[in-house]
Image (spheres, rainbow, N blue to C red):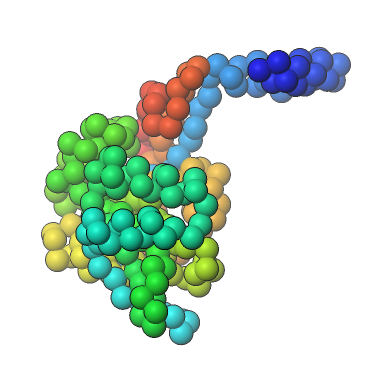
Amino acid sequence: MLKIIKRKFTTLSRLFRSGNLSDIFKVLINPLFRIIVYRIDKISLDSYQHKSNLNSLKLTSKIANQKEMDAIFNKWPDSKEELIRHEQVYNEYGFKTCFVFYNEENNEPVHFQFLITHKDLSLVEQALPFKMYSFLKQPSNASQEWIYTFNNYRKMGVANIAMNDIISYCKKNNIHSIYSHRGINNIASIKMAEKIGYKQVSTAYQWQFFKQKRHQGYYLIKTI
C-alpha cells in the first residue's frame, strides 16, 4: 500500500511541475471513478455470408455437456486467468450453451464460444448487467459471448469459420439476429467482428465507482 501511495505522489509531483491539468485530474479521479466504453454489434442471419475454410485444419463441433467441459477445464493448456474466467461462466453463472470445436485429426479442443438466448434471461439478470442484454427479451435474438481460441490454434481464422455452425444452429432455433459486444479500443476484436459481418448498432457506457469490479456499476446504452 505504501508503495502505491509513494508511486501516486511521485506521479502527481511530476505532473504538477509540468502543469498538465488534464493528466493531474485523471490521476486523482481514476482510483475513485472510471468510465468503460463498449461497442455493441449486431449481425442479421439473412445478411450473413457463409465463410470458407482457407486452411487445412478440419473442425468438428458440438454443444458440450458437463463431462466434456470438465475435460477441457482439467486439461487447460493456456493461462490460469483464462481458465478461471471460463470456468466461472459455465459452472458459476450457469450458461450451458457452449459450442466446442475440435481438431478432426486428434480430437483436441481448438475453440469454444457461448450463445446466450432468451431462455437464459434469468441467468443474465443474476450474473450480468441486464441493460447490456435487454435485446434478449425478444426470443428471436441471441448474444455471442466468451469467444476463445486456444493458443496453439490462433491466427488460423478459426473464430471466423466457427461462425458458420453458430448461424446454422440459430436458424434451426428461430433466432434471426445475434448481438456481441467488445471494448471500444479492442481493435483486434473489432476487426474480427467486422470480418464476420457484425455492424455496430449502439455504444454502452459503464460508470464504475470506488471498489466496483467486473460487471458492477451504472450502464447507459446509446443507439447510433
> Which of 48 and 15 lies nearest the eye of the viewer?
15
Above or below, 180 relative to 61: above
User: Seen in the image, is 30 located left or right of residue 8?
Assistant: left
Q: Residue 215 placed where, x, y %?
A: 39, 31
Quarter of the figure that contains the C terminus = top left
Res 214 seen here: yes
Q: Residue 141 placed where, x, y %?
A: 21, 50
User: Seen in the image, is 42 located left or right of residue 110?
Assistant: left
Residue 163, image quadrant = bottom left
Residue at horizontal 38 percent and vertical 41 percent from the top: 202
Q: Residue 78 placed where, x, y %?
A: 51, 57
Q: Residue 194 placed where, x, y %?
A: 45, 59
Quarter of the figure that contains the N terminus = top right
User: Seen in the image, is 36 located left or right of residue 74?
Assistant: right
Above or below, 144 relative to 50: above
Residue 26, image quadrant = top right
Please give the count of numbered marks on the rendered protein. 0
Residue at horizontal 28 percent and vertical 62 percent from the top: 68
> Which of 81 and 193 lies nearest the eye of the viewer?
81
Above or below, 127 relative to 141: above
Residue at horizontal 14 percent and vertical 66 percent from the top: 172
Residue at horizontal 49 percent and vertical 32 percent from the top: 36
Res 196 seen here: no
User: From this viewpoint, which residue is outermost toward the right?
Assistant: 17
> Which of 121 and 183 lies nearest the eye of the viewer?
121
